[in-house]
Amino acid sequence: MQERIQKIIANSGYCSRRKAEELIEKGEVELNGEVVKLGDKATQEDKIVIKGKPLIYSDKSFYYILNKPKGILVTKDDPQKRRTIYDLKSTIALKKKLGQNLNYVGRLDGMSEGLIILTSDGELNNRLTHPSHHVEKTYLVRTEPKIKEEDILKLKNGILMDNAKFFAKVSNIKLNTFYITIAEGRNRIIRKALAKLDYEIFQLKRVSVGKIELGTLEEGEVRELNQKEIDSLIN
């Protein structure tokens, strides 16, 4: 059955569908030796080449989480050759085991840490990152000064950020640390919102996505999700 090429690329785990569309628009994808354009279709029997390398298909989808250390970038290609999650011992070993790099779902900036979902399921990646699905993500935050009650209320009621309101729930406040839960994915939105309220962030660690929890996973390590966790993401 023929499918749009960006969907085939996403389902292979190479990247998200939006990133695949960008690659096609840049002319970096070929189908059976010809440069493709958006809207072109193919089957898994066709030869798709991205940036000169054949696309690898897999009949099985894989689902893992990574505890991203602080100072590591979430990207597959960094022009400045800085260290990325794919340079970690755990993800290098995972690639050797599976024969492919799993794609990350969403991002964390370089100074943030914590839970990153890694998967070859392109459809799941597209659903989890699409703004219409409002998947809740919870972060452990440490600030200076201690967060004020009036600012907690402002976050609950929504702060105007770049012409759109940002909503967040604050809980479990202990001294200068607390948990903040959001249901959107704008770039560095927590940092920007807290900076607007005059807080300096010293730690920003994602501890859960939906029902998937980081738990006691060691920094820099990966863990395969169990079927119950996978079902919670898919459903």
Image (cartoon, grey):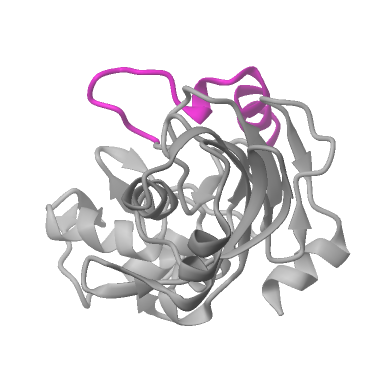
Percent x, y of residue 65: 69, 44
Q: Residue at x 24, y 19 (%)?
A: 80
Which of the pair 64/5 is nearer the observer? Answer: 64
Which of the pair 139/177 is nearer the observer? Answer: 177
Q: Quadrant of residue 210?
A: bottom right
Q: Residue at x 42, y 19 (%)?
A: 83
For the image, the number of numbered tags is 0
Q: Is residue 79 above or below residue 32?
A: above
- Examine the rendering and report whether any part of residue 157 can be seen: yes
Q: Is residue 8 above or below residue 69?
A: below
- Examine the rendering and report whether any part of residue 60 can be seen: no
Percent x, y of residue 50: 29, 46
Give, as a single range, the part of the protein colored magenta: 76-98
**What is the quadrant of the C terminus in the image?**
bottom right
Residue 83 colored magenta?
A: yes
Which of the pair 135/124 is nearer the observer? Answer: 135
Q: Is residue 26 above or below residue 185?
A: above
Left or right relative to 78: residue 107 = right
Left or right relative to 91: residue 101 = left
Q: Residue at x 37, y 52 (%)?
A: 197
Q: Residue at x 64, y 18 (%)?
A: 89
Which of the pair 69/174 is nearer the observer? Answer: 174
Left or right relative to 76: residue 67 = right
Left or right relative to 48: residue 149 = right
Percent x, y of residue 190: 44, 52
Percent x, y of residue 219: 70, 25
Residue 103 colored magenta?
A: no
